[in-house]
Amino acid sequence: MFDTESRGQVGIGTLIVFIAMVLVAAIAAGVLINTAGLLQAQAQATGEETTSEVSDVVQIGEVIGIDNNSQGTIDTLNASVQLASGSDPVNVSQASYTISSPTGNATVVNGNNNQNGAITHYQQQSLEDGTSVLTEQEDILVVELDLDAQSGIEPLEESETVSLILQSPAGGQTYKELKTPRNIDTDASYIL
């Protein structure tokens, strides 16, 4: 009546194999969930850093070159800076400035490393005295770069091409190429 040769295997061995498969699947699911959580946290941090690099940008407006040393060279640059469209607040006192000219390159870091006095801030529009943080679109700050006070770069001669790069603390960069005039009179100032 009962055919014992075609019955399925039932017993403790099958139960052990089934439990082992469930345990392996549970461990694999735990590892996948943990890895997914780590990847999500890393992706979120990377996204925030990238957003701050793009959104913390300062525009360089008009740059005026001045001959303060009466030698027929431009030894001071006054650059007006303001927030770019949609930018978050930027502390300009922590920004770094790179000046590149044919006579040499120099990176001036303002803030704690401005011991030589090469950088001075002048509040221009919508800013209180002593403030170097641009918070609103209409805020304008004049950054004075004294080339004589900074080592590694000489005052600018006539007909030189100069690059000015402003890097905000979060990493956003603004690049401005300037050209000195053909003739520089002593004690004169020029829009570059």
Image (spheres, grey):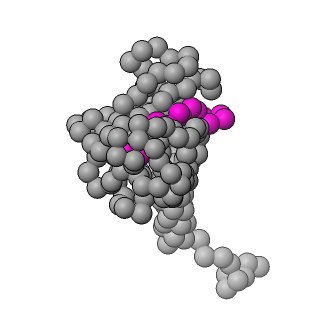
Q: Residue at 62% of width from left, 26% of height from top?
A: 137
The quadrant of the image that shows the C terminus is top right
Q: Residue at 58% of width from left, 38% of height from top?
A: 62
Q: Nearer the viewer, residue 73 or 138?
A: 73
Q: Nearer the viewer, residue 50 or 123?
A: 123
* Vertical side of 93 occupied by 127: above or below: above
* Vertical side of 162 occupied by 140: above or below: above
Location of residue 101 in the rendering, given as x and y in whole percent from the top left corner: 43, 58
Furthest residue in direction bottom, as rendered: 5
Furthest residue in direction top, as rendered: 128
Quadrant of the image occupied by residue 148: top left
Magenta-drawn segment: 74-87
* Residue 149 is at least partly visible in this image: yes
Q: Nearer the viewer, residue 63 or 47?
A: 63
Furthest residue in direction right, as rendered: 1
* Residue 39 is at least partly visible in this image: no
Q: Magenta span has 82? A: yes
Location of residue 19 in the rendering, given as x and y in whole percent from the top left corner: 51, 62
- Looking at the image, residue 176 sits to the left or right of residue 121; the answer is right
Location of residue 180 in the rendering, given as x and y in whole percent from the top left corner: 51, 51
Q: Magenta span has 90? A: no
Location of residue 44 in the rendering, given as x and y in whole percent from the top left corner: 54, 46
Q: Nearer the viewer, residue 171 or 190?
A: 190
Q: Residue at 77% of width from left, 79% of height from top?
A: 1
